[in-house]
Image: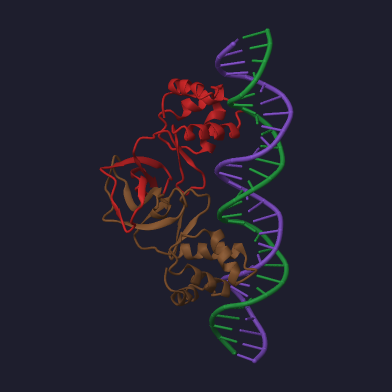
Chain colours: A brown, B red, C purple, D green
Amino acid sequence: MRSPAELTQAFRQTGLKVTPQRQLLFRLLHGNTSHPSADVLFALASKEMPGISLRTVYQTLNDLASMGELHSIDFGTGSARFDPNVTDHQHAVCNECGTVHDVHVSRAPKMSGLEGFDIHDAHIVYRGVCADCAS
Amino acid sequence: MRSPAELTQAFRQTGLKVTPQRQLLFRLLHGNTSHPSADVLFALASKEMPGISLRTVYQTLNDLASMGELHSIDFGTGSARFDPNVTDHQHAVCNECGTVHDVHVSRAPKMSGLEGFDIHDAHIVYRGVCADCAS
DNA sequence: TTGCTAATTAGCAACTGTTGAGAATTAAGT
DNA sequence: ACTTAATTCTCAACAGTTGCTAATTAGCAA
């Protein structure tokens, strides 16, 4: 995801308006590596802007996602997680605390057993126990 | 997932009863590589046993999953998909038709960038366009 | 600065997938 | 056949998300 300033330009160029609610979400998301859910972002946003609507949070997240500034990822936790890091990376999910960590692989593994499948994207999810939870 | 006959034994040994509803689901799932949702299984089951409850389908799927006979996988399609193949394999999801194909990788890729994470499981999802949809 | 207009917001209802609860039924061992 | 605990079905409830709409507001132009 680009910086709040850059997003402001991009939104206006697309004919979208830059409201205080959106600016707040830009700030909350930029550089955020916690893979927050809409609910978590709504809680964070509410602290700074009481009265902001959950609907508005969803709307802005969807706008950002359809602009490619954000990835919406489903880890099977019941709610979508949003990732402002759209560069190539993978995820490690802790079975204990649920934290989602960013990780990398040297190169995407080749798959076999399916002819003629045109791969656009490969996503790896590691599950296990993170260092903090190992006890 | 084991065969219906083997599951019948396993269920009784665990103190679970083997009802006609469950037997039907055992049959529908055994060897099924279509990664069906609960809804799809409910529709299939309803053809052979009109009046069967969606709740019963969910219950049996959950029973099988907690016995490790079935994997519940979330591909972000809105509903959980169930996979009776619990051997090591990966998935390729077609962006066009939504079909989930089973694929294999030579070996699990090593991850970097996170110290002390104890990996229990690595799951790869390939997304792209399958042969049937390439046109 | 003011006015215009389309975009946005907030609030709430609605929707989907899934689970909880409880009365009636039934599998499976005695 | 009898007993009992497991299961089924029905229906309500729940979580996450989206649709709808009146009221508000950003952004532009004069």
- The picture places residue A117, in percent across and down from the top left corner, at 32, 46
State whether residue B123 appears in this view. no
For residue A36, above or below residue B128: below
Q: Is residue A22 visible?
A: yes
Instruction: From the top left corner, tell me how far across and down residue B51 is, in percent.
Output: 62, 28
Pick whichever, B74 or B130, lies toward us: B74
| The N terminus of chain A - image quarter | bottom left
Question: In the rendered view, does C1 fall on the left or right side of B32?
Answer: right
Tell whether A84 sits left or right of A108.
Answer: right
Say if C13 sits above or below B43 in the image.
below
Q: Is residue B74 above or below residue C2?
A: above
The answer to whether A56 is drawn above or below residue D15 in the figure is below
Give C29 or A6, whichever is nearer the viewer. C29
Which image quadrant for residue D30? bottom right
Q: Residue placed farthest to the front in the image?
A: A135
Whole-percent x, y for residue A76 in the image: 48, 48
Q: Find residue B48 and report its image quarter.
A: top right
Give left or right: position of D7 versus A81. right
Q: Residue at x 32, y 41 (%)?
A: B103
> Nearest the camera: D26 or C24?
C24
Position of residue B1 measured from the top left corner of the image (x, y, whole percent): 41, 30
Q: Tell me which residue sits at (46%, 45%) in the image.
A: B74
Asked where in the image residue B99 lies, by quadrant, the reply is top left
In the picture, measured across the screen, residue A121 lies left or right of residue B61, that is: left
Q: How many marks?
A: 0
